[in-house]
């Protein structure tokens, strides 16, 4: 899929003009890989050689996340000998933002010329065999958010709004990630992500229903970003960290505090895993 950078719809206007890029970003720094981190997955990349730290408040048009565990910073630097852009935090649809704003990180990644995007998310387990703290390589998704970020989005090429999603998660990147995990003897699985709008957690009946539909994990992010990534022609790897078991599967109640606690506990493991993936891409 070819990259698309120019849009004719006003809601898709670029964030950065040339003079703003020169002002905000290091000269001649062109990141090749973007990484968007989920809840509670903070700054654990010890191997990252940061050359610039840009708060979202400094980027024109950007909105700072309000959800705990999403600090709202963009780190630029090198990781495993690759130039990367590390987005610490994302917006969620449940915060009351339009999809145009929810996908702000992916739009900026496209403008920066990034070709590969690694997306992470904290999720609830629907698959009964999944355990808390387990990593899941996403192989497909079910969009149950009730909307789509491509609504109203058009490129200069007729028909480009109708994006094929057959292989929206790169098989090449999945193979790399699973191979590294097996080499490290990590507990990992390949699963389907079900995206819901939130902010309320699923009911017991909903949890069981999504299980019947074939979902392995459930969350409130990632999918809109994946859809727009494919529109922009980016290669995508989705990684999920199981932070709790969903209603209908577990008798325990769900809470965001538990999500953050588990995310913090395993963030170093995830960071080291991502670093090895970046090195292998």
Image (cartoon, helix red, strand yellow):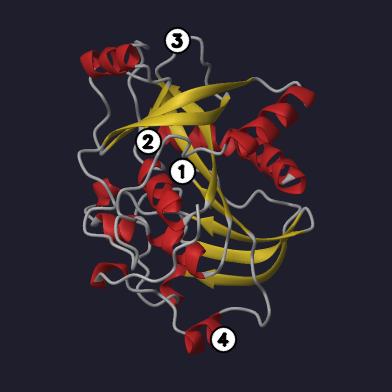
At numbered mark 1, what does the secondary structure look like: helix, strand or loop?
loop
- Real-space Cα distance between discs 2 and 4? 38 Å
- Real-space Cα distance between discs 2 and 3? 20 Å
Q: Earlier in the sequence, mark 2 or mark 3?
A: 3
Q: Can residue 205 be seen in this view?
A: yes
Report the side of 231 relative to 159 (left or right): right
Decide: is 230 above or below 240. below
Number of the label disc, if any, that sits on residue 39: 1
Decide: is 132 above or below 75. above
Residues under numbered marks 1 and 2 in contact, where contact means CB atoms less than 8 Å apart: yes
At numbered mark 3, what does the secondary structure look like: helix, strand or loop?
loop
Q: Which of marks 2 and 4 is nearer the N terminus?
A: 4
Number of the label disc, if any, that sits on residue 22: 4
Q: Earlier in the sequence, mark 1 or mark 4?
A: 4
Q: How crowded is the residue under tag 2: few (<14 C-alpha within 10 Å), some, or many (20+)?
A: some
Number of the label disc, if any, that sits on residue 128: 3
């Amino acid at each position: 899929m070819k990259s698309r950078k120019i849009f004719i719809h006003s809601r898709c206007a670029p964030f950065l003009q040339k003079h703003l890029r020169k002002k905000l970003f290091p000269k001649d720094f062109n990141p090749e890989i973007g990484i968007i981190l989920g809840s509670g997955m903070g700054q654990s990349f010890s191997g990252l050689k940061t050359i610039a730290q840009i708060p979202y408040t400094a980027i024109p048009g950007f909105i700072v996340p309000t959800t705990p565990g999403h600090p709202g910073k963009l780190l630029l630097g090198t990781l495993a000998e690759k130039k990367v852009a590390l987005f610490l935090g994302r917006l969620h649809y449940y915060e009351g933002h339009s999809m145009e704003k929810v996908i702000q990180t992916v739009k900026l990644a496209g403008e920066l010329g990034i070709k590969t995007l690694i997306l992470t998310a904290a999720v609830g387990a629907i698959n009964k065999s999944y355990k808390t703290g387990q990593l899941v390589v996403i192989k497909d998704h079910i969009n149950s958010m009730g909307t789509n970020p491509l609504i109203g989005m058009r490129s200069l090429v007729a028909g480009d709004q109708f994006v094929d999603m057959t292989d929206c998660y790169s098989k090449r990147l999945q193979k790399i990630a699973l191979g590294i995990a097996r080499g490290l003897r990590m507990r990992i699985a390949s699963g389907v992500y079900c995206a819901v709008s939130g902010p309320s957690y699923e009911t017991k009946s909903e949890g069981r229903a999504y299980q019947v539909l074939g979902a392995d994990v459930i969350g409130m992010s990632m999918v809109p970003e994946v859809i727009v990534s494919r529109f922009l022609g980016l290669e995508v790897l989705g990684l999920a960290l199981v932070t709790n078991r969903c209603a209908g599967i577990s008798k325990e109640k769900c809470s965001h505090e538990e999500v953050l606690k588990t995310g913090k506990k395993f963030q170093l493991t995830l960071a080291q895993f991502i670093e090895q993936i970046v090195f292998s891409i």
